[in-house]
Image (spheres, grey):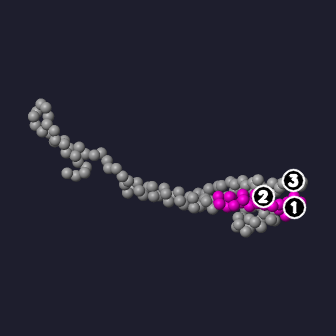
């Protein structure tokens, strides 16, 4: 007797003879080869997506830390141009390249310095499909 067939024998009340019933299981439990390939492809796409996108987020988190440090270490009498030079030097060391037009430095007299950085990053995914990421980093 195979695993797919269950044979039952019972006797009927009226006819007096034994009847043979063969019941087949409707389906097997488990993952088919096609299903395994499908899930494997989804896993590969997710891993590839994460590998392509995570460096941009790592740069953003590093940029936020650099901006916060620059704000704390800027002297009240320092000019905005000097703060920009110091910030660019830190970004060069960290190998973070962002457009200069996205860096805004605000000084209120002898008060604290406020640095905000806003930029877009285009991450190519597959062929002509790209992902646009918008980042806003501010100290505090």
Name the residue at 72% across, 53% down.
136
- The span from disc 3 to disc 2 (Cα, nearest Å) is 19 Å
**Quick one: label 1, few (<14), some, or many (20+) residues within 10 Å?**
few
- In the image, farthest residue toward the bottom: 93
The residue wearing badge 3 is 111
SS type, badge 1: loop
Residue 60 left/right relative to 33: right
**Quick one: label 3, few (<14), some, or many (20+) residues within 10 Å?**
few
Residue 77 left/right relative to 7: right
Where does the image place residue 79, in percent across and percent down from the top left?
87, 61
Give whichever of discs 3 and 2 has the lower sequence position.
Answer: 2
Q: Is residue 49 magenta?
A: no
- The span from disc 1 to disc 3 (Cα, nearest Å) is 11 Å
Viewer-side residue, 19 vs 131: 19
The residue wearing badge 1 is 78
**Mark 3 and mark 1 in contact (Cβ < 8 Å)?**
no
Where does the image place residue 135, in percent across and percent down from the top left?
69, 54
The residue wearing badge 2 is 103
Residue 9 shows in this picture: yes
Q: Is residue 62 magenta?
A: yes
Give whichever of discs 1 and 2 has the lower sequence position.
Answer: 1
**Quick one: label 2, few (<14), some, or many (20+) residues within 10 Å?**
some
Viewer-side residue, 18 vs 132: 18
Give whichever of discs 1 and 3 has the lower sequence position.
Answer: 1
Between marks 3 and 2 in the image, the one whose residue lies nearer the viewer: 3
SS type, badge 3: loop
SS type, badge 2: strand
In the rendered structure, which segment of residues is drawn in magenta?
56-83
């Amino acid at each position: 007797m195979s695993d797919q067939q269950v044979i039952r024998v019972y006797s009927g009340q009226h006819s007096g003879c034994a009847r043979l019933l063969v019941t087949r299981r409707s389906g097997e439990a488990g993952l088919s080869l096609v299903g395994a390939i499908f899930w494997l492809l989804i896993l590969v796409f997710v891993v590839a997506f994460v590998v392509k996108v995570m460096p941009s987020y790592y740069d953003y988190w590093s940029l936020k830390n650099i901006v916060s440090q620059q704000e704390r270490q800027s002297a009240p009498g320092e000019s905005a141009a000097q703060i920009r030079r110091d910030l660019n030097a830190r970004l060069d060391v960290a190998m973070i390249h962002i457009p200069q037009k996205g860096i805004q430095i605000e000084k209120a007299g002898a008060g604290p310095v406020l640095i905000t950085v806003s930029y877009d990053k285009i991450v190519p995914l597959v062929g002509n499909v790209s992902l646009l990421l918008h980042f806003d980093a501010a100290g505090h």
